[in-house]
Amino acid sequence: MPGSAPISCLGPWPKDVGVIALELYFPSQYVDQAELEQFDGVSAGKYTIGLGQDRMGFCSDREDINSLCLTVVQRLMDRNGLSYDSIGRLEVGTETIIDKSKSVKTVLMQLFEDSGNTDVEGIDTTNACYGGTAALFNAVNWVESSSWDGRYALVVAGDIAVYATGSARPTGGAGAVAMLVGPNAPFAFERGLRGTHMQHAYDFYKPDMVSEYPVVDGKLSIECYLSALDRCYSVYRNKIHAQWQREGSEKHFSLEDFGFLVFHSPYCKLVQKSLARLMLNDFLNHPSPNTETGPFVGLDAFRDVKPEETYFDRDVEKAFMKASAELFEKKTKSSLLISNQNGNMYTPSVYGCLASIIAEHTPSELAGQRVGVFSYGSGFAATLYSLRITQDHTPGSSLDKLVSSLSDLRLRLDSRTKVSPAVFSERMKLREETHHLASYIPQGSVEDLFPGTWYLTRVDDKHRREYARRPLDDDLKLKIHLNCAAELGCLGRRLTLNLLY
């Protein structure tokens, strides 16, 4: 693995710091959104077309934020053959708070006990869906700082997104992502290219410390998201223009300069609207757009619109969604695999989109591309930044290994169990009534979980939580391996062994 280096090898600034490995976990059960439409008595297509969602993963009372993060960290470490003493920083981004003092990070330190490694910096970071990105920035900054000791940083983003019965419930989901950060990474941060916007708003928040459910102002939340996107893109564009000018280039930056674009995805339809929004920005900022031919054809009527007046302008939205349709197919649609099939994971959402891009392309298709990443968290905090993918896509390269490790995502999604909306509703009710209780034994079946999943065994009378791991099933591992080998063989892709569930 690239990344870790002895102290004697450390230079003044590590090269190509970024994401070396990425692991994703989602629950083993889901509800079908079309069936949920019928169950909720809403019009057909409200969730599947209006929101762009097909399936929604969810957790029983056997899983909580600690168990999700335990599972994804152990998977990443096992699948990449890493020792726990190779980790020098571990930081968690989450908004799923089950203890107002004890961090998820300290629970994860159970995994480090056998290694004897307790010299691990970092802690939890919280601001709605932005916490994972803040944790990732902290990890990158650590590796690029004088504090770095040559070891990897590990970033974990995890959440359980649940809503009260009503119109917001189908925008839920659950999952966790773990990312290994270090130098010589196949997905490297582009230095100096971050556009951030932070502002105070009550668009989505969780003031009830006993409830998992948020308070949501849906219309305000969309306005905050789109306004943050506008401002982050403007700042990013100014910074890259400044870089190019220092290099002697007067080139004008546009969406075409991104190979791929991924967004925080509360629901898939908002992502498609967000790409259209960026095209609107390109159009308005272009000194002399051609409205006769090319991507801006027929858009001259919108030349003088003010962005802040168009958040809910259906004419603008429709025109630019149509104009950006080809870009969406090319640069963003493949990022929505996890979002469409599992739902909104909060902090891991945008990184599930990044994982989907990796899973849906070959190393040669990814090599050399710039990936734009827009992260948003209500309240609100947002950043648009970019990653540059290595040019090296040869067999055995770090990029090839990363792609191989995620090439089974569709098979893993298809191996989940569908439950009826009635059962889903019952399990949500059970979580609502019990997630905060002491002296509680979870009722959910351990056998329903994927092999290798950590789960909650009990909460004692002092609210102390205990966990165990479902054993790995050797027969299932072999079956998954054979299925993946057959599927990937048809695609001509290389498969890395050691597919752990």
Image (cartoon, helix red, strand yellow):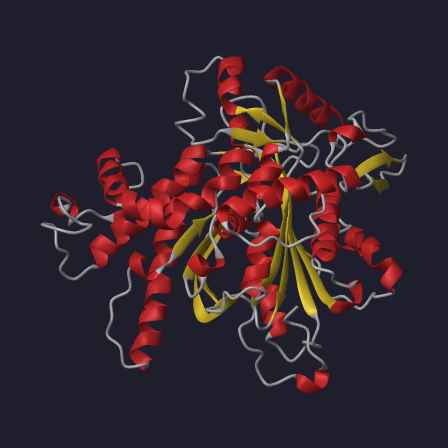
- The reply, left or right, for residue 327 in relation to residue 126 is left
- The percent position of residue 86, horizontal first and vertical second, equals 75, 68
Q: Residue furthest right?
A: 461
Question: Is residue 100 at least partly visible in the picture?
Answer: no
- The reply, left or right, for residue 251 in relation to residue 385 is left
Compared to residue 202, the image places residue 210 above or below, namely above
- The reply, left or right, for residue 93 in relation to residue 85 is left
Residue 20 position by quadrant: bottom right
- The percent position of residue 76, horizontal first and vertical second, equals 69, 54
Q: Residue at x 48, y 50 (%)?
A: 357
In this view, the residue in front, 404 or 236, is 404
Question: Is residue 76 at least partly visible in the picture?
Answer: yes
Q: Residue at x 31, y 41 (%)?
A: 311
- The percent position of residue 137, horizontal first and vertical second, equals 57, 63
In this view, the residue in front, 479 or 69, is 479
Quarter of the image with the N terminus is: bottom right
